[in-house]
């Protein structure tokens, strides 16, 4: 009789020759296509198109999920006046079954492409090489292009997303979210949780107008960088759309309830912000960047570090004063090696020069 170890060895060897391919979407499964991008790099023979998706199955009727929601309600909701429906809506994306090994295909630029299979968290990021002659003049003139999931035998839902065209020598604004463009109160953990999951979202006064004016002048693209998890993407994107902020790419955190402490998911270390922003600077070799954040946590430190490392690429740093405090010592220490005309702290966007 074949030994167990020998059997495992044969199965492993067979997997090298007969790889397991991802399965197609089922009827009860959904896909989110997060905003992707295509950087038009003339130094390359092929452009790189970045596609990021999440495949999952809703499990709102699960008993375990109902128990979790009730427990979280007891922890988060401190007032009877608060609408628990808001809480349940914002929690919905946390309470799904992530689907791994799902390999789906998309259509963009008149062609179909098969994406990498999804990981255990249901996410998949695929880099697709696009020949410049495959991109029509119409797409080159627009700032964004539509991408859609090709229907499968078991799932013919319409799932669409957008691809941003990033041009050489353009300018991109990278913005923090919490307390920069949305009121969160990050220094107060209780208020942060309430403002994230229960209270109506509130924009920071004047920031929408500031960003819209920049979009009308010299800023070609926007990236919202947050320590919030990807599960918050849909509700945040809907909010910014309603508030008429410029449409944006997103850089957020990966998070699974069973992998981490739920109550620490909004921790925002300085290193995370740098790791989220630096890949864009390195890949978009000729693009200039404006960085916008707030004084609540470590945005000044992270942005100053990037401005020193990439002095020709970071053209301006704006920091919103999120709290009433004296920042002079902190500013002098952090920005001592940066020219004063490259950064500005402000309370109201009307102060920005």
Image (spheres, rainbow, N blue to C red):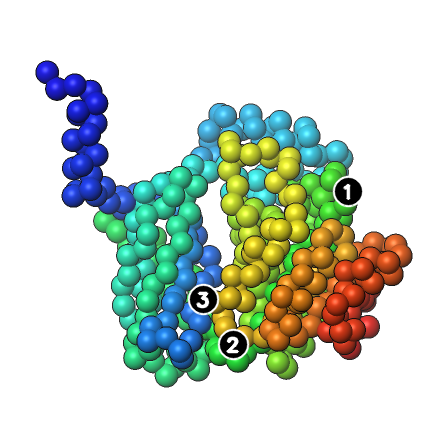
Q: Which mark is residue 286?
A: 2
Under circle 1, the secondary element is loop
- Any part of residue 208 in sight: no
Q: Earlier in the sequence, mark 3 or mark 2?
A: 3
Name the residue: 55% across, 25% down.
Answer: 67
What separation in Å lies between label 2 and label 1 (alpha carbons)?
39 Å
Q: Nearer the viewer, residue 337 or 147?
A: 337
10 Å neighbourhood of mark 3: few (<14), some, or many (≥20)? some
- Mark 1 and mark 3 residues within 8 Å of each other at the beta carbon: no
For the residues labelled 1 and 3, the Cα–Cα distance comes to 35 Å
Residue corresponding to mark 3:
37
When asked about the image quadrant of residue 73, the answer is: top right
Per the image, label 2 sits on a secondary structure element best described as: loop
Residue 192 place in picture, x, y as percent: 72, 44
Q: Residue at x 68, y 30 (%)?
A: 75
Q: Are marks 3 and 2 in contact (CB under 8 Å)?
A: no
Between marks 3 and 2, how big is the CA–CA gap?
15 Å
Q: Is residue 281 visible?
A: yes
x and y percentages locating residue 300 in the rendered image: 73, 59
Q: Say what secondary structure mark 3 lies in.
A: strand
32 on left or right of 306: left
Tell me, for residue 38, which label it has, or none.
none
Q: Quadrant of the C terminus?
A: bottom right
Q: Quadrant of residue 209?
A: bottom right
Q: Is residue 292 above or below residue 54?
A: below
In this rendering, the label closer to the viewer, 3 or 2 = 2
- Give the residue at mark 1: 188
Q: As displayed, is residue 235 above or below residue 267?
A: below
Q: Is the residue 20 above or below the residue 161 in the image?
A: above
Q: Quadrant of the N terminus?
A: top left
Q: Find out whether the residues at labels 2 and 1 contact each other: C-beta distance under 8 Å.
A: no
């Amino acid at each position: 009789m074949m030994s167990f170890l020998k059997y495992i060895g044969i199965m492993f060897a067979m997997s090298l020759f007969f790889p397991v391919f991802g399965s197609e979407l089922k009827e009860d499964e959904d896909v989110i296509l997060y905003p992707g991008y295509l950087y038009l790099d003339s130094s390359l023979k092929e452009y790189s198109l970045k596609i990021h998706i999440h495949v999952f199955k809703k499990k709102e009727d699960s008993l375990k999920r109902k128990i979790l929601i009730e427990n979280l309600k007891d922890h988060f909701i401190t007032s009877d006046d608060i609408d628990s429906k808001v809480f349940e809506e914002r929690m919905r994306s946390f309470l799904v079954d992530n689907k791994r090994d799902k390999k789906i295909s998309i259509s963009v630029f008149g062609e179909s492409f098969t994406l990498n299979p999804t990981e255990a968290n249901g996410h998949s990021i695929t880099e697709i090489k696009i020949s410049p002659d495959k991109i029509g003049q119409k797409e080159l003139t627009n700032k964004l292009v539509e991408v859609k999931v090709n229907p499968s035998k078991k799932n013919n839902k319409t799932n669409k997303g957008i691809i941003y065209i990033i041009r050489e020598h353009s300018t991109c604004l990278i913005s923090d979210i919490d307390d920069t463009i949305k009121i969160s109160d990050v220094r107060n953990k209780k208020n942060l949780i309430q403002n994230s999951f229960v209270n109506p979202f509130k924009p920071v006064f004047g920031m929408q107008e500031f960003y819209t004016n920049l979009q009308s002048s010299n800023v070609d693209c926007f990236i919202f960088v947050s320590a919030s998890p990807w599960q918050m993407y849909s509700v945040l994107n809907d909010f910014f759309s309603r508030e008429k902020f410029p449409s944006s790419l997103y850089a957020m955190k990966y998070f699974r309830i069973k992998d981490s402490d739920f109550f620490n998911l909004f921790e925002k270390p300085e290193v995370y912000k740098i790791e989220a922003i630096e890949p864009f600077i390195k890949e978009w070799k000729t693009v200039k960047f404006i960085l916008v954040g707030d004084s609540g946590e470590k945005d000044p430190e992270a942005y100053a570090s990037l401005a020193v490392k990439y002095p020709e690429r970071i053209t301006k740093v704006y920091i919103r004063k999120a709290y009433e405090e004296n920042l002079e010592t902190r500013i002098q220490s952090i920005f001592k090696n940066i020219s004063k005309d490259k950064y500005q702290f402000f309370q109201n966007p009307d102060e920005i020069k």
